[in-house]
Image (cartoon, rainbow, N blue to C red):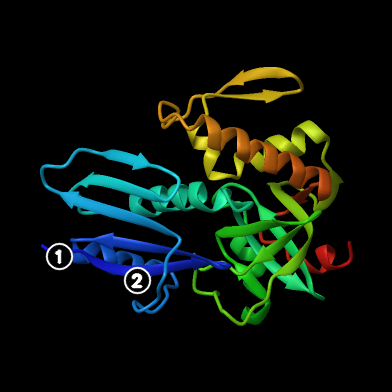
Amino acid sequence: MNSKKIYFKIGSISIEITSSTSYVLEFFKKQYCLLPTTHKPFDYRLTFNVDTLSVFKMHINRKTGEISFPKYEDYSHFSFFFNFIVQLFVLQQGIILLHASSVEKGQKGYVFAGPSGIGKTTIIKNIEPTHIYSNDVTILKKLRDNYVLLCSPFDRFFSASKKQIKLEKIFFLRQAKKTSVKDLSHSKGYESLLKNSIFYYFLDTIVVKGKKKRLNNDFADIKIPDYSLLMQKYLLQLFALRPSTLLNKKRDDKIYSLVESL
């Protein structure tokens, strides 16, 4: 069966996605904002193989990636591995993907990170879509001595007309009885950034306050040492340039007005 192709773009980087299985491509068309299929040339290529006889395999190099999956009824796991390989590709260009929502206010970018269900989507639900840059996967790019926020093609708020904007602040959300803000220490800020990057799930240890902390992650046996070191370098630079803030919030509290005043 002939492979079919679709295209995905982050900033100026384009990725060709190929698969001989039509429902794989349909899944991506529903999940992401894609480019017209005539888009060429591409910078990276990612191939998905789905077969009844397949076992899970993943192979990645600097320009190409290939994933083989057994045939499942639920293909939601595609997103996780797709995001991971896209991160490997674009990391080489100084781009970081964070599990976060993000908005633009006054030509400045604000990021809200935290675990699923913490309220990232709640914060942006009353904001005009033209000011929303991401709902779940936020894209940050190192540009000279700063970081900029790119509009994310990972969700429905994507628009090619939204320009990159300077990153102003990163908030880490935590449920609390009272809404408040607090600056994070270097170690806590860095650890929070790392936990909200997709690389976190592929690490077996992290260093906190000069001490190694062992993790019990499902994918720690997938070794990506060069990429992990590069990611940690960029996250340390990101925290140094834009120190992070802990945002304690009451459940369902409308806190965006507080954020605007900071």
x and y percentages locating residue 202 in the rendered image: 48, 33
- In this picture, is 104 found above or below 188? below
Say what secondary structure mark 2 lies in.
helix
Answer left or right for 231 relative to 242: left
Q: The disc labelled 2 sits on which kind of residue?
A: Lys
Q: Is residue 215 left or right of residue 124?
A: left
Q: Quadrant of the C terminus?
A: bottom right
**Quarter of the image where one finds residue 10:** bottom right
Badge 2: few (under 14), some or many (20 or more) residues near its Cα, within 10 Å?
some
Query: Residue 135: x and y, percent?
Result: 57, 64
Q: Which amino acid does label 1 sit on?
A: Asn
User: 75 or 221: nearer the eye?
Assistant: 221
Tell me the tag on residue 2.
Answer: 1
Residue 43 coordinates in the image, percent (x, y): 45, 61
In the image: residue 126, left or right of residue 243: left
- Closest to the observer: 30 or 53? 53
**To which residue does mark 2 refer?**
29
Percent position (x, y) of residue 31? 39, 67
Q: Is residue 76 visible?
A: no
